[in-house]
Image (tube, grey):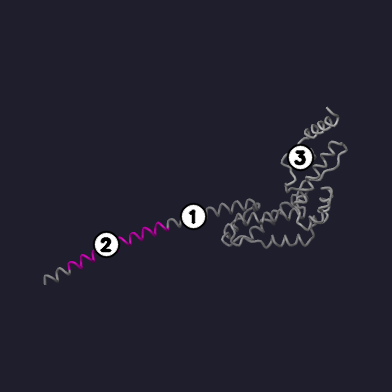
Amino acid sequence: MSDDSSVSSGSITKISKLEFNDPLYLHPSDTFGASLITQKYEYEDDEVLLGQWDRCNFVVLTWILMSLSEDVYNGQKISKTAEFVWNELKETYDKIDASVTFNLYQKINSCSQSGQSLSDYYHNLNAMWRQFDDMVKIDDIVSANKSFQEHSQFLKLMQFLMGLDDVYVPIRSQILTSDPVPSVKTAFSIISRDESHRLHSASSSNVNKIHSSAFNSKTANFVNGSNSTNNKKKNTKSTSEMHKL
């Protein structure tokens, strides 16, 4: 066997032994056509792993470029490394100014149910809360201050309750007079159960009304039928008596 064959075989063996959590590991499903973005990789000194790094870099670079809009792609298509493109995009687009935060917070505070289902309204609001918390790095503040966490949850509860449709006014009053007031998640569960009970009661009431209407209709038809029969008998009797005269 030639030396080149030995080196090639050894390289394949070394690469095949890479652990799943190794940054240079490539799963068979990791192809150039996958539209994914993953972490950047550093160069390796080992010649075998350097070749694997080149392959990983090309795959990741392709993922990133395929995820860009056409105008952004045109500005990055000649880039050689995924690391360079990643840092360029991060520096250019990973910025949040006060106006973005303001617009999102305004959207949260003006959000209302407006005829949506309770579930859709809550999950839409919850998605905006998570986005806002990520913007202002709320998790870092919360982890260091339990009182702030409680205050943040209280504000979310108020925002959720304020946006509810008027049909929930009674249950909303019950929640606000609770001591202590529940978390927003608990409040959503309470209102969901109340809504389910109310809809079930309304459905049962409608069924009873339908049965009652059907019964009344049958009764009316029976009475009208009886009256019609009696009237026919009276008319027949009157005609018979007139003939006798």
Please name the residue shown 80% across and 39% down the image.
24
Amino acid bearing label 2: Ser
Residue furthest out toward the top? 1
Q: Which of these two is toward me, 79 or 164? A: 79
Q: Real-space Cα distance between discs 1 and 2?
A: 37 Å
| Mark toward the start of the polypeptide (1 vs 2) | 1
Picture mark count: 3
| Mark toward the start of the polypeptide (3 vs 1) | 3
In the rendered view, would you say 111 is above or below 44? below
Magenta range is 209-237
Magenta segment, prevailing SS (helix, strand or loop): helix
Residue 85, percent from left and from top: 82, 51
Amino acid bearing label 1: Ser
Amino acid bearing label 3: Leu
Residue 193, percent from left and from top: 56, 51
Q: Secondary structure at mark 3?
A: loop
Of the numbered discs in the image, which one, if any, rests on residue 103? Answer: none
- Residue denoted by label 1: 201
- Residue denoted by label 2: 226
Q: Decide whether residue 23 is among the magenta residues.
A: no
Q: Which of these two is toward me, 32 or 95? A: 32
Give yes or no for contact between labels 1 and 2 (Cβ–Cβ under 8 Å): no
Please name the residue shown 75% across and 62% down the image.
102
Residue furthest out toward the left? 245
Quadrant assignment, res 129: bottom right
Q: Is residue 151 in sight in this rendering? A: no
Q: Decide whether residue 220 is among the magenta residues.
A: yes
Quadrant assignment, res 23: top right
